[in-house]
Image (cartoon, helix red, strand yellow):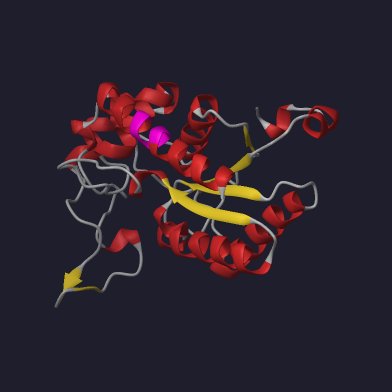
Amino acid sequence: MELARATWTAIEDQKVDVVLFPIGSTEQHGPHAPLGTDAYLAETVATRAAEQTDVTAVVAPGLPIGVSPEHRSFAGTIWVSASAFRTFVTEAVASLEAHGFDRVVLVNGHGGNMPAVREVAENLTRSHSMQCVSFTWFDAIDTGDVRMGHAGPVETSALLAARPDVVDCDRIAEAGEASVDRWGTWIGGTNVAVDTEEFAPNGVVGDPRLADANTGEQLLAAAAERLCEVIDYVASS
């Protein structure tokens, strides 16, 4: 069930075990993938898991803006501070508790959100009568020999499986030719780069030419399966 599509009476009448709160970003993903990549994939994983789990899981409206200042030089990127992000997610999730929804999983799709999402989940669990867990889909699965990167083969494969309509396939070759192999500029074992443009002029880390829909389907299936494990744990805790 999607919370935004349900009536309040349907929600009141339904015994909800777990609420899934997708969190993404609106940030550059190279010349071939949309700004909403992280939001699309977080929502996809959340929806698939909600359909597959044996408990009743409701998918809340996703948050499409996150902590993305590292992409600020690329047109269309929207970001907020980590403090503003934490406040919004905290208050939104706390409002669910007012209706008795005290089991929540934050389903995250953006690496830059991870520290803040973990902190929010921990603080809500400590300070409220609820169980809140953070889950970042690509961090929860084994991507094999392919590094996560950014707009590279992992995310592009997942998009080709979930939302092929939003991928500009005509620009994948261009994106791959100008991509870099590693996130950051590493000196003395330390990443000294602040913004993405410093090391990835087109914003792409990892070669999206290696992407394919079959691989994407496997990645999304694995992520949904792992999320189901988390849902079962949260529902029974």
How far from the left and from the top, in percent, is residue 202?
Answer: 29, 48
Say which quarter of the image contains residue 176: top left
Q: How many marks?
A: 0
| Residue 152 visible within the image | yes
In percent of the image, x 44 and y 27: which residue is there? 166
In the image, residue 50 sits, relative to residue 189, either above or below, namely: above
In the image, residue 218 sits, relative to residue 140, either above or below, namely: above
Magenta span main SS: helix
Say which quarter of the image contains residue 217: top left
In percent of the image, x 76 and y 47: which residue is there? 100
| Residue 72 visible within the image | no
How far from the left and from the top, in percent, is residue 27?
Answer: 46, 49
In the image, residue 44 sits, relative to residue 145, either above or below, namely: above
In percent of the image, x 54 and y 67: which residue is there? 82
Q: Is residue 201 left or right of residue 99?
A: left
In percent of the image, x 25 and y 27: which residue is there? 215
Q: Is residue 222 left or right of residue 125?
A: left
Quick one: which residue is furthest to the bottom in this view? 188
Quick one: which residue is furthest to the right in this view? 9
State yes or no: residue 224 in magenta. Answer: yes
Q: Nearer the viewer, residue 182 or 76?
A: 182
Magenta region, residue range:
221-225
Q: Nearer the viewer, residue 62 or 7?
A: 7
State yes or no: residue 30 in magenta. Answer: no
| Quadrant position of the N terminus in the picture | top right
In the image, residue 98 sits, relative to residue 128, either above or below, namely: above
How far from the left and from the top, in percent, is residue 106?
Answer: 54, 49
